[in-house]
Image: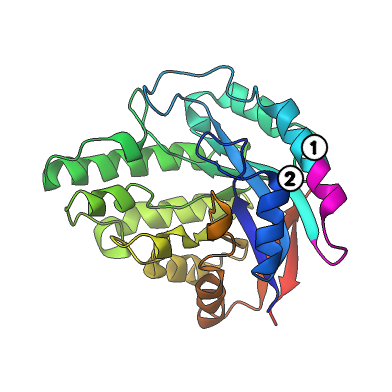
Amino acid sequence: MYFTDNHIHSLCSPDGYGSMTEMMEASYAAGVRHMCFTDHCDMDNYLTGAPDPDCFSFRDRMNQLYAEALKAKPGDMTLCLGLELGEGNHNPELAAEIAASPELDFVLGSLHNLRGTVDFYEMSYTDETFCRNLLDLYMGELLELAGLPSFDVMAHIGYPVRYIRKAGFSSDMTTDTHGDRLRALLKKLIESGKGIEINCAGYRNRYLNDSVPAFDILRLYKEMGGEVITVGSDAHKTEQAGSGLNKGFDILRSLGYKYVTVFEKRKPKFIKLD
């Protein structure tokens, strides 16, 4: 089966464990034939929440590793270069400057932390009320982010739920709990020509075992006319390469999609599903 992967990390991410060549080779072995590296470039320090004006200091290393991977790639594989640009709404000017880098094929827009707070991964979750309030704040910042031009596809909508579940709480982000704001968010993305992703990392998470966003949000996007949709493993090490992509593609088909989206030089291309 022909898989695309538009969310994958390398050593350029602080939590990445493989070179681009290693991640590419592992992905190819898993059936991926079109992939785009999306290493972390966050406006804030994930441990403190403080602004990080040097967040793209790895640019030269990124370009070097990508050039090495291009030399090693199989002839029937397409390899692209992108970023996972985090918290663009916290510093829109810098985000726009980074996103305009000419070497980038694709930019994921993500939100790993709220203003002045640590990454949701590092946060302490105390009770259901705290979790519900946190998700409301998260939705508000996603709506801010959606209005910016510095990304192509919004990443893992519902990201905090991973860690809420791990902490033992049940607060969720679904069309039942956040329907009106999710509709407003998806409407804003669709009207601006942006897309969403099916992030398959949730299938590796024993507390979640689901896509991010959840199926009902993906279905709502399709019902609202959303067409731009990518699939990503969100792999950070070689053993995760290609993980969950089969389930992501199954979701596409179940929703009636005939194409999966990829990006080259920030322009969407639609690949027919086999």
Q: For the magenta stretch, what is the residue range?
A: 68-77
Q: Nearer the viewer, residue 52 or 27?
A: 27
Residue 140 % position (x, y): 36, 39
Residue 14 in the magenta stretch? The answer is no
The N terminus lies in which quarter of the figure?
bottom right
Q: Amino acid at mark 1?
A: Glu
Residue 197 % position (x, y): 54, 58
Q: Nearer the viewer, residue 194 or 158?
A: 158
Q: Nearer the viewer, residue 51 or 168?
A: 168
- In the image, is 240 to the left or to the right of 62? left
- In the image, is 2 to the left or to the right of 93? right
Residue, x 87% and y 48% (percent of image)? 71
Q: Is residue 145 above or below residue 249?
A: above
Q: Can residue 247 be seen in this snapshot?
A: yes
Colour scheme shown: rainbow
Residue, x 75% and y 38% (percent of image)? 65
Q: Check disc 1 and report its element: helix, strand or loop.
A: loop
Q: Earlier in the sequence, mark 2 or mark 1?
A: 2
Residue 48 % position (x, y): 36, 22
Which label belongs to residue 103? 1
Instruction: Count residues near mark 2 (Cα–Cα under 10 Å), then give few for <14, some for 14-19, many for 20+.
Output: many
Q: Which residue lies under the disc numbered 2?
A: 81
The C terminus lies in which quarter of the figure?
bottom right
- How far is the residue under mark 2 from the one under mark 1? 7 Å
Residue, x 43% and y 68% (percent of image)? 220
